[in-house]
């Protein structure tokens, strides 16, 4: 967004928004239009708050592109356009006001940047706003709380919306699941990491303890279906069968959303797989506790921000990269050896279809044409980009690859492991 501003205006790195966001769930439409918001709950938020928030974001871009410079930078002007009165200005500071004039003292000399400047806390004096996919009671909300204690968690109806919420400055961070110890990778988020320009700034691992929830008075033998997030259904498949629940499984957007749906529609033949907190929030009973197929069920989440953090060497760091290559099959081996020769451990490798070029045609000298699928490879390795061995490894990787992007270099989650409990 900064690139859209006229050159004589500086955008300070935060846009104040109405202070209460509350648990209103962001939808795709919210990121684009302010007139089609989906209000799940009215707690602490009003429609006009949200219209103002979205309009501020929209008009900031529009006004900076279309208005004459002396008007577009005015906080009052933007506030008036949005019909939203805020006591703080919108942080658009004309550069000329920062420089010295005859009758005004010169501005203080530029201050050296610190790590805090490069991974800034919000400047509006409020809590950090963290976007997650799902509704209150989702595991992603718990992960947001673990990553950023005391944050203001902002529910979003899709992963993509959580990315957009950060890109549009509605949220400061997004916390998104990337892999689970039983269900495997969350492919959608791998794809979105590449499509968006956010940076991974941290990771958290959350023990996931699933419960089977139903309306009060409902017994297991009343059930004709179980609904939940596809990952949660996969994580409990064996246990559901052991419980004699050979009923239909239906996928919904998130675990807590499944619980909310049962409560809202008074469904007496349906159970949800979700957290004990979701049972509390939506008034459901716990029919079975700890139904994940393995007690050490854990989901790894990544934290995303608009700016990368400065990599360090005083604590264990992990770095995530994605690359593609266009030459031969031994490239993957060569790339992996660049890490092996330097004793850098890989913690994860994932391949995804190369959507821009899904198939490569290779002319066979004898007959016809062989078709190879093309992939993007995502690799996590245990080293910080501040380490020379990691820099050298990537320099070597770059020689073999047609595309290479560092998604982030960030502190590893080193919290001691304990199997999932009911909390
Ligand atoms: O539905 C939720 O509660 C989520 O937070 C999503 C999600 C996931 O996408 O993997 C997160 C953790 C669990 O693994 C199950 C579901």
Image (cartoon, helix red, strand yellow):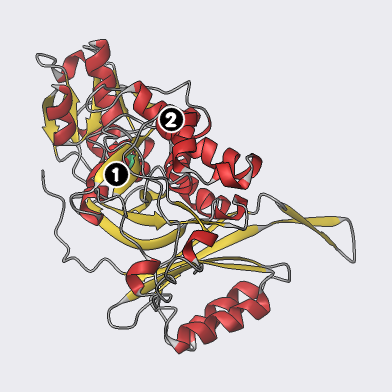
- Mark 2 surroundings: few (<14), some (14-19) or many (≥20) residues within 10 A: many
Pick the residue in front: 220 or 354: 354
Residue 112 placed where, x, y %?
Answer: 39, 78
Residue 16 to residue 273: above or below:
below
- Mark 1 surroundings: few (<14), some (14-19) or many (≥20) residues within 10 A: many
Q: Is residue 203 left or right of 323 when viewed as pictured?
A: left
Question: In this orientation, does residue 30 appear?
Answer: no
Q: Quadrant of ligand 1?
A: top left
Pick the residue in front: 133 or 250: 133
Q: Is residue 151 left or right of 38 when viewed as pictured?
A: left
| Mark 1 or mark 2, earlier in chain | 2
* Picture residue at 43% right of the left edge, 35% below the top: 158
Residue 214 to residue 132: above or below:
above
Residue 312 placed where, x, y %?
Answer: 35, 79
* Picture residue at 25% right of the left edge, 51% below the top: 125
- For label 1, being within 8 Å of ligand 1 is answered yes
Q: Is residue 180 left or right of 399 when viewed as pictured?
A: left
Pick the residue in front: 412 or 122: 122
- Secondary structure at numbered mark 1: helix
- Secondary structure at numbered mark 2: loop
Residue 28 to residue 121: above or below:
above
CA distance separating discs 1 and 2: 16 Å
Quadrant location of the C terminus in the rendered image: top left
Disc 2 designates what residue? 27
Q: Residue furthest front?
A: 103
Q: Picture quarter containing residue 266? A: top left
Question: In this orientation, does residue 195 appear?
Answer: yes
Residue 357 placed where, x, y %?
Answer: 72, 53
* Picture residue at 13% right of the left edge, 31% below the top: 288
Pick the residue in front: 359 or 58: 58
Disc 1 designates what residue? 140
* Picture residue at 16% right of the left edge, 66% below the top: 416
């Amino acid at each position: 967004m900064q690139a859209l501003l006229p050159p004589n205006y500086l955008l300070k790195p935060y846009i104040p928004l109405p202070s209460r966001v509350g648990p209103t769930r962001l939808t795709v439409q919210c990121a684009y239009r302010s007139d089609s918001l989906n209000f799940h709950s009215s707690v602490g938020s009003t429609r006009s708050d949200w219209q103002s928030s979205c309009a501020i974001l929209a008009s900031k871009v529009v006004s900076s592109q279309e208005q004459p410079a002396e008007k577009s930078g005015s906080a009052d002007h933007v506030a008036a356009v949005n019909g939203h009165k805020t006591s703080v200005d919108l942080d658009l500071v004309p550069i000329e006001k920062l420089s010295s004039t005859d009758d005004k003292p010169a501005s203080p000399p530029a201050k050296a940047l610190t790590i805090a400047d490069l991974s800034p806390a919000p400047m509006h004096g409020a809590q950090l706003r963290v976007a997650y996919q799902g509704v209150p009671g989702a595991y992603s909300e718990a992960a947001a709380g673990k990553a950023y204690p005391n944050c203001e968690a902002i529910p979003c109806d899709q992963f993509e919306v959580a990315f957009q919420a950060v890109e549009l400055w509605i949220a400061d961070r997004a916390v998104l699941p990337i892999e689970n110890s039983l269900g495997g990778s969350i492919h959608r988020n791998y794809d979105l990491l590449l499509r968006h320009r956010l940076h991974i700034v941290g990771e958290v691992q959350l023990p996931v303890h699933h419960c089977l929830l139903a309306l009060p008075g409902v017994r297991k033998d009343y059930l004709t279906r179980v609904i939940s997030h596809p990952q949660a259904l996969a994580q409990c498949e064996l246990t559901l069968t052991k419980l004699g629940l050979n009923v239909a499984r239906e996928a919904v957007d998130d675990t807590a959303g499944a619980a909310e749906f049962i409560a809202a529609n008074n469904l007496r033949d349906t159970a949800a797989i979700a957290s004990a907190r979701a049972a509390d929030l939506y008034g459901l009973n716990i029919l079975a506790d700890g139904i994940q197929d393995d007690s050490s069920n854990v989901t790894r989440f990544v934290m995303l921000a608009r700016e990368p953090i400065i990599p360090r060497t005083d604590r264990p760091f992990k770095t995530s990269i994605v690359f593609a290559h266009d030459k031969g099959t031994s490239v993957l081996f060569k790339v992996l050896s660049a890490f092996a020769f330097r004793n850098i451990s890989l913690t994860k490798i994932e391949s995804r279809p190369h959507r821009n070029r899904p198939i490569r045609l290779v002319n066979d000298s004898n007959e016809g044409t062989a078709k190879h699928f093309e992939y993007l490879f995502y690799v996590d390795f245990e080293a910080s980009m501040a380490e020379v061995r990691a820099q050298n490894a990537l320099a070597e990787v770059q020689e073999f690859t047609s595309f290479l992007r560092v998604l982030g270099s960030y502190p590893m989650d080193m919290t001691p492991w304990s199997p999932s409990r009911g909390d």
